[in-house]
Image (cartoon, rainbow, N blue to C red):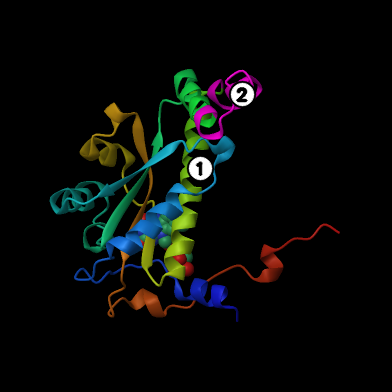
Amino acid sequence: MSDILKEYEWRYATKKFDASKKISDSDMFVLKEAMRMAPSSYGMQPYEMIIVENDKVRQELCEKAGMNQPQIKDASHLIVFANNTKIDEAYLTDYIDSISKVRNISKEDLKGRHQLISSAVTQQSEDWIKNWAKNQAYIGLGNLLATASRMQIDACPMEGFSTEKFDEILGLANKNLSTAVLATLGYRDHADAAKDQKKVRKSKEEFFNYIS
Ligand SMILES: Cc1cc2nc3c(=O)[nH]c(=O)nc-3n(C[C@H](O)[C@H](O)[C@H](O)COP(=O)(O)O)c2cc1C
């Protein structure tokens, strides 16, 4: 089996982390860059990362907003993927400005792209924009999980939480952010029974369809 596939086989959604083990700053640097460098639709990155470092806040999130899932308080790091909630003309103008600066292209030459994104994204309904932004956050999550497994760092992606309560405890509404999905990162506890479970996946025949 290729090394990459062995790494994906090694990865599992960790249920019980060893609370005494912490990810080093240099490994966190790589994991954070893996999230920041993820691709996104039109390159707009309509989400931000929140790294919750305060133990009391993590305890509160676990008990009041996270269905008491122990990973939220025990993992080395709790990462919140928060989608932007105000993706309007001003947001798009800021984005176009940064393309202009980084690539040294005049705003005049970026007019076509500005108009395209405006009609494809910012002029869509609020619900459409929310779904689109959350979808982009999941690409960041995928990059993080794949990178962590390559580094032999454990992770659990998590949707089992209350968005309203997470947003309230983290004070996200006044930053125009809302919790999309979580990742907990760290090192598996030797007593985590989930680490020995066989993977349940669709067979190749069920999963892959070919149109020849
Ligand atoms: C978006 C997403 C949300 C998930 N939410 C949770 C969760 O809240 N709690 C949990 O223990 N596992 C959660 N999982 C883990 C899945 O249950 C797990 O990935 C799946 O059963 C496959 O098992 P494996 O990842 O160990 O191979 C989530 C996975 C994904 C991708």
From this view, report whether residue 58 is shown above or below residue 197. Answer: above
The kind of residue tagged 2 is Leu
Q: Is residue 4 magenta?
A: no
Q: Is mark 2 within 8 Å of ligand 1?
A: no
Decide which of 181, 89 is in the foreground and name it. Answer: 89
Quarter residue 91 falls in: top left
Magenta highlight range: 100-123
Q: Which mark is on residue 136?
A: 1
User: Are there few (<14), some (14-19), or many (20+) residues within 10 Å of tag 2?
Assistant: some
Q: Which mark is on residue 110?
A: 2
Q: Quadrant of the C terminus?
A: bottom right
Distance of label 1 from label 2 (alpha carbons) = 23 Å
From this view, report whether residue 118 is shown above or below residue 206. Answer: above
Q: Quadrant of ligand 1?
A: bottom left
Which residue does the image show at 21% across and 68% down from the upper left? 19
Image coordinates of residue 149 in percent, x first then y, are 44, 68
Which residue does the image show at 57% across and 38% down from the upper left? 41
User: Are there few (<14), some (14-19), or many (20+) residues within 10 Å of tag 1?
Assistant: many
